[in-house]
């Protein structure tokens, strides 16, 4: 499934500025700012409790920041939420599929929410399932699928309305190595061939070693935002994984959130 970027490159797909979020006395995020542009694959790395889930919840509109702003394709999440969310596709850490419904029923529910004409929806669904080798499973109940195939269905669903921004939240949790690689490769292809901007939140560095940029988040604060090569250079030429671990160790352990 290919996407066409019809907006100027000068307009960020995502622009988040000075995001703050607290739960009672605990600060989950403090003055977090980031941008993504069309065709970028950006890794959001952080240990458990770093604030990744909170950031994902803010960017996906599930939570509202205490302070700061979020714009997707120039649309303000606070005042233009429907337009902002129309440009966003999400694969959450926890499955959001109805396990008792068929693959097709799950996908059509999503396209109905986005107001897609049924003919367009069916064509995009057919194309997406074929690309991931799932056409034969179209009428199968989701609960009958393997974990890897369920994730593929979630990715197909997230892309049916052709978003410009794809948010992946620990999307490979519980998958076997082959399924993990297939999902990662699919998202890389979307960014490099389709122009989608993707933010991949994970603590598994091997999934994002080929990312265009790396953002390291710990204790609710961004410790680094730059290329993988710059991250390595910042930490004396260490590998990306060791550099990530070193930065987080220097900042101290993150409090559970």
Image (spheres, rainbow, N blue to C red):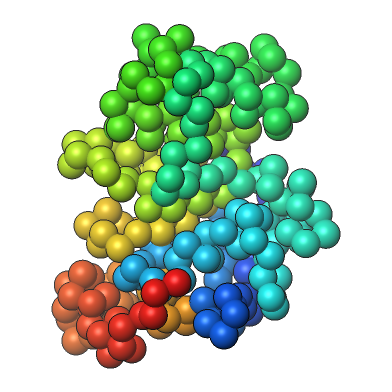
Image location (x, y in percent) of residue 226 = 40, 74
Residue at image x 38%, y 35%? 151
**Residue 242 placement: quadrant:** bottom left
> Residue most toward the front?
24
Where in the figure is residue 35, as x and y percent of width and height?
57, 67
Please give the count of numbered marks on the rendered protein.
Answer: 0
Residue 104 lies left or right of residue 248; in this view the side is: right
Asked where in the image residue 36 lies, by quadrant, the reply is bottom right
Q: Residue at x 47, y 47 (%)?
A: 92
Indicate left or right for 173 with 158 as reference: left
Compared to residue 81, the image places residue 21 above or below, namely below
Looking at the rendered image, the quarter that the C terminus falls into is bottom left
Q: Describe residue 164's horizontal placement relative to residue 100 as left or right.
A: right
The reply to whether residue 130 is in sight is no
Whether residue 223 is visible, yes or no, is yes
Camera-side residue of 203 and 121: 203
Residue displayed at 78% across by 62% down: 78
Residue 155, position as x, y percentages in the image? 45, 35
- 74 vs 252, nearest the viewer: 252
Tell me which residue sits at (36%, 80%) in the image. Answer: 254
Q: Nearer the viewer, residue 107 or 37?
A: 107
Does residue 130 appear to the left or right of 195 in the view shown? Answer: left
Coordinates of residue 74 in the picture (x, y in percent): 74, 58
């Amino acid at each position: 499934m290919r996407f066409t970027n019809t907006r100027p490159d000068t307009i960020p797909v995502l622009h988040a500025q000075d995001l703050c979020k607290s739960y009672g006395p605990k600060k989950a995020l403090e003055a977090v700012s980031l941008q993504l542009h069309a065709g970028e694959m950006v890794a959001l790395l952080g240990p458990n409790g770093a604030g990744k889930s909170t950031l994902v919840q803010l960017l996906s509109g599930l939570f509202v920041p205490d302070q700061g702003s979020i714009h997707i394709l120039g649309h303000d999440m606070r005042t233009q939420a429907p337009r902002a969310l129309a440009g966003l596709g999400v694969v959450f850490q926890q499955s959001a599929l109805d396990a008792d419904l068929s693959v097709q029923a799950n996908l059509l529910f999503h396209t109905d929410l986005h107001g897609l004409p049924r003919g367009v929806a069916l064509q995009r669904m057919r194309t997406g399932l074929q690309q991931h080798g799932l056409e034969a499973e179209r009428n199968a109940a989701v609960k009958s699928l393997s974990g890897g195939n369920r994730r593929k269905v979630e990715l197909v669903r997230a892309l049916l309305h052709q978003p410009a921004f794809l948010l992946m939240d620990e999307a490979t949790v519980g998958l076997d190595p082959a399924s993990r690689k297939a999902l990662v490769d699919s998202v890389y292809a979307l960014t490099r061939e389709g122009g989608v901007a993707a933010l991949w939140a994970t603590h598994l560095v091997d999934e994002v070693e080929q990312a265009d940029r790396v953002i390291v988040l710990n204790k609710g604060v961004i410790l680094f935002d730059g290329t993988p090569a710059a991250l390595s250079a910042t930490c004396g030429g260490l590998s990306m994984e060791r550099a990530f671990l070193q930065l987080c160790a220097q900042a101290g352990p993150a409090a559970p959130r």
